[in-house]
Amino acid sequence: MYKIRTSLLLAACGVATMHAGALQGQTLITDFNTFFENELYASWASLDAVIDSGPDSYSVTATGYGSNYTYIGALGILGAGNTHVELDVTLSGPPEADGLLGPIVTLVDADGSNYNFAWYGQLLGHHVLTQSVSAPTWISAPGTTPGLDLDNLLHMHLQLDPGGFGTMGAYTVAFNNLNLIEVPTAPGDFDEDGDVDGADFLIWQRGGSPLPGSVDDLQAWQANFGTTAPLIAAAPEPGAIGLILLAGLFALRLRRFTGA
C-alpha cells in the first residue's frame, strides 16, 4: 500500500559549495522533502510497492523496473551555467542485487528536449552520482533547440532499472537530493566527466574534441592525462603509459603531415 503525502516541496536555488576542493555553482532541483509524483509506472504502480515521501528522501520499495513522472515547470529552476547532474541516492536490497541496480533521471525542457542520465550497475549503499549535461546516457528527443535548457525544465522522470537482478526480489531506492552543479573541467577532458582518461583519447581519435583531429587537442590530453577537476596530479593507471606513448606517436605523425 502506498504511503504518499500529498504535498510537493521542490525548491530551486543558486548556491556555492565546496566540492573536491573547488568552489562551484549548484542549483537544487529537489531535496525530495515530502516529494509527490504525478504518475507512477510499471512496478512502482503495483499495489505491492511501498512509497514513502519522507522529510529527507523519497523512497520506493518494489520489484522489477519502475518509474514516475513529475511536473517541475512551476518551480522557476534557473540552472543555466551548470555542467552536470548530481544525484544523491541510496540503494538497498538482498546481496543478489549488489552491482546490478541502475537509477535513472530524465529531464525534459520546454522545447521537448528529453535527456536521460543513467548510472547502471551500482553497488548497494549510498552514492553521489554525476554525469555531464552535454553527454547524457541517451537522448529520447532532441527538441527544437539543440541542448537541454536548464532555465526551462518542465518534467522530471525518476526510474530504477534492476538490470540482471530483474524480479528476483524487492529493492529499495531512496532519492535524497538532485542538483545541477558546475564542475570545472581540465583541458583534454573532452567528455566533461571530471577527469582526463582513455575515454577522452578515444573521443579525440574519433574527431569529437573541440578542434577535431588537431595536435593542440591531443597535446592538451597528453599534458593532463590522469588529472581530475580541479587539476590534481595522479599516477598513471595500469596501461596508461602505453596509451600516452601511442598518443605521442599520433602527435608526431600529425606534425609531420602538417609540416609543424
Image: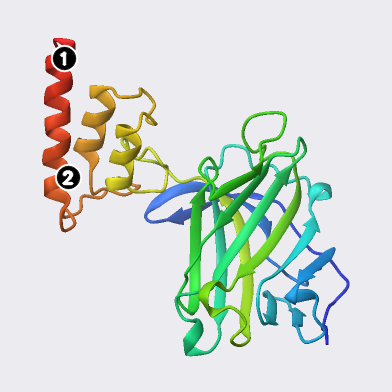
> Of the residues under marks 1 and 2, which one precedes in the sequence?
2
Can residue 197 be seen in the rendering of this structure?
A: no
Task: Residue under label 1, please give it.
Answer: 257
Q: Is residue 238 left or right of residue 60?
A: left
x and y percent of residue 130 in the render?
A: 49, 56
Q: Which one is nearer the viewer's eye here, 175 or 107? A: 107
Q: Amino acid at mark 1?
A: Phe
Helix, strand or loop status at disc 1: helix
x and y percent of residue 174 in the render?
A: 63, 76
Q: Which one is nearer the viewer's eye here, 59 or 16? A: 59
Q: Which one is nearer the viewer's eye here, 136 or 176? A: 136
The local crowd at label 2, few if under 14, some if 14 to 19, many if 20 or more residues have their Cα within 10 Å, is: some
Q: Is residue 10 left or right of residue 223?
A: right
Task: Residue under label 2, please give it.
Answer: 243
x and y percent of residue 182 in the render?
A: 51, 45
Helix, strand or loop status at disc 2: helix
x and y percent of residue 134 in the render?
A: 53, 40
Q: Amino acid at mark 2?
A: Leu
